[in-house]
Image (spheres, rainbow, N blue to C red):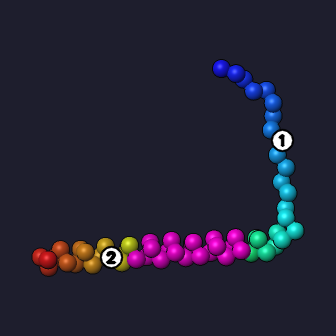
């Protein structure tokens, strides 16, 4: 097995449009968060309905 001794150099470069990109990413993160919250809320609302239906013998 060969061992690599070279180190990879990394450099963070911010584009000129960084503020617009940051806003777009923040907007996307909010949309994803809202969708996740909506799905979690819907899942919690479905559980009691299934329980009630089973109590009625359906």
Compare residues 53 and 6 and report the one nearer the observer.
6
39 in magenta:
yes
Q: Main secondary structure of the magenta part?
A: helix
Image quarter of residue 16: bottom right
Compare residues 47 and 8 and report the one nearer the observer.
8
Q: Give how far across and how far down residue 35 sits, in percent.
A: 52, 75
Left or right side of 42 for 12: right
15 is higher (above) or lower (below) than 38? above
Name the residue carrying label 2: 46
Q: How many marks?
A: 2
Name the residue carrying label 1: 9
Name the residue rendered at 72%, 23% in the picture: 3
Name the residue rendered at 40%, 77% in the picture: 42
Q: Give how far across and how far down residue 23 sits, in percent.
A: 74, 75
Q: Give how far across and how far down residue 47 sits, in percent.
A: 31, 73
Compare residues 40 and 10 and report the one nearer the observer.
10
Where disc 1 sits, the SS reads loop
Left or right side of 54 for 7: right
**Quarter holding the N terminus?**
top right
Image quarter of residue 18: bottom right
Name the residue rendered at 84%, 41% in the picture: 9
Label 1 Cα crowd, 10 Å radius (few <14 / some 14-19 / many 20+): few
**Quarter holding the C terminus?**
bottom left
Which residues are the magenta region?
Answer: 24-42
């Amino acid at each position: 097995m060969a061992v690599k001794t070279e180190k990879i150099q990394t450099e963070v470069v911010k584009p000129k449009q960084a503020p617009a990109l940051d806003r777009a990413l923040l907007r996307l993160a909010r949309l994803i968060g809202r969708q996740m919250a909506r799905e979690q809320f819907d899942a919690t609302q479905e559980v009691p309905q299934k329980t009630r239906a089973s109590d009625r013998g359906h």
